[in-house]
Amino acid sequence: MRCAAMTVDVDRDVNIAEKGRIGGVSREKDGKTSPRYKSAAKGLKMIVSILDDLGIQGTFFIEAETAEVLSKTIDLRGLLRSHEIAAHGIIHEDLTGTDTGIKLSARQVEDVVVGSSTALRGLLRRKPVGFRAPYLHIDDSVLQALAQEGYLYDSSVIRRQDKGEIYPYRVFGPLIEAPISSGVDKEGKKIVSYLWPLHERERDVRDYEHMVSKFSAGLLVLATHSWHMVESYKDGVLAEKKVAENANWVRTIIQGAIDRGVEFMTIEEYIEEHMGD
Ligand SMILES: [Zn+2]
């Protein structure tokens, strides 16, 4: 069976980890790197509209501070009512300290893991069961904290498809890893199911269509950022024509997968349906 989950990280615009600072900043704009959320908000509405149009439920990994800021101008709870809500840190913490150089204590990691869930529950009245680490920076101590705090799954690992197959797997106790995956493109080069290079205009739709055509079984976790519809690292805030192009590409990739018989669902739904004990 071929299933796919469209997953969207909803976090501060064009985020970057900064040395000596636990939380993420935004790419420099007008001389400032303080976190911004405008592109995240606009892109979120666009992606939800595409998914709703196609009758698909997505999985949204929402950073707590972004949720708080967006809630001031958007009815986030209403917007995402038919989609899965999952956690993505409180202030986009680099949990492993790989880029910030700050190694968090076990207690600090636990505070982020618990706090990101509590904040979303307060704002959106639903308990997230999934987690994606900011920058995909994950290690055993983070996974252990997730297992201990009762999360159902993590989705921060990139794993290679085996002959087009890729499945979630158990990590610690009941905790499941639902990996983002990599396949090969037409030239035999590695391509990851994260749409990042598409929105940075380093890859085109056909590369992803090829990847989907080679996917043969399991759960294909497609991933993107809501702000990436509107802003890129390379070009900053995009002209409306390019924004529309981004929306078109995402729709084309999902529609193409549906046409090939791939069934879209949330990660939570996949785990419940296919990994029950
Ligand atoms: Zn993020």
Image: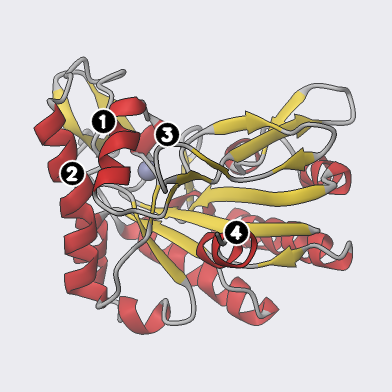
- Kindly identify which residue carries mark 2: 112
Residue 201 shown left or right of residue 12 in the figure: right
Residue type indicated by callout 2 = Val
Closest to the observer, 191 or 132: 132
Label 1 CA crowd tier, 10 Å (few <14, some 14–19, many 20+): many
- Figure quadrant of the C terminus: bottom right
Say how the picture is coloured.
secondary structure
Mark 3–mark 1 Cα distance, whole angstroms, equals 9 Å
Q: Is residue 256 visible?
A: yes
| Percent coordinates x, y for residue 156 in the rendering | 46, 38
- Kindly identify which residue carries mark 1: 95
Please, what secondary structure does the residue beneath circle 3 have? helix
Mark 3–mark 2 Cα distance, whole angstroms, equals 15 Å
- Kindly identify which residue carries mark 3: 136
In the rendered image, the vertical position of residue 92 relative to residue 260, given as above or below? above
Which of disc 2 and disc 3 is earlier in sequence? 2
In the rendered image, the vertical position of residue 256 relative to residue 217, given as above or below? below
Which of disc 1 and disc 3 is earlier in sequence? 1
Residue 132 shown left or right of residue 254 in the figure: left
Residue type indicated by callout 4 = Met
Which of disc 3 and disc 4 is earlier in sequence? 4
Residue type indicated by callout 3 = Leu
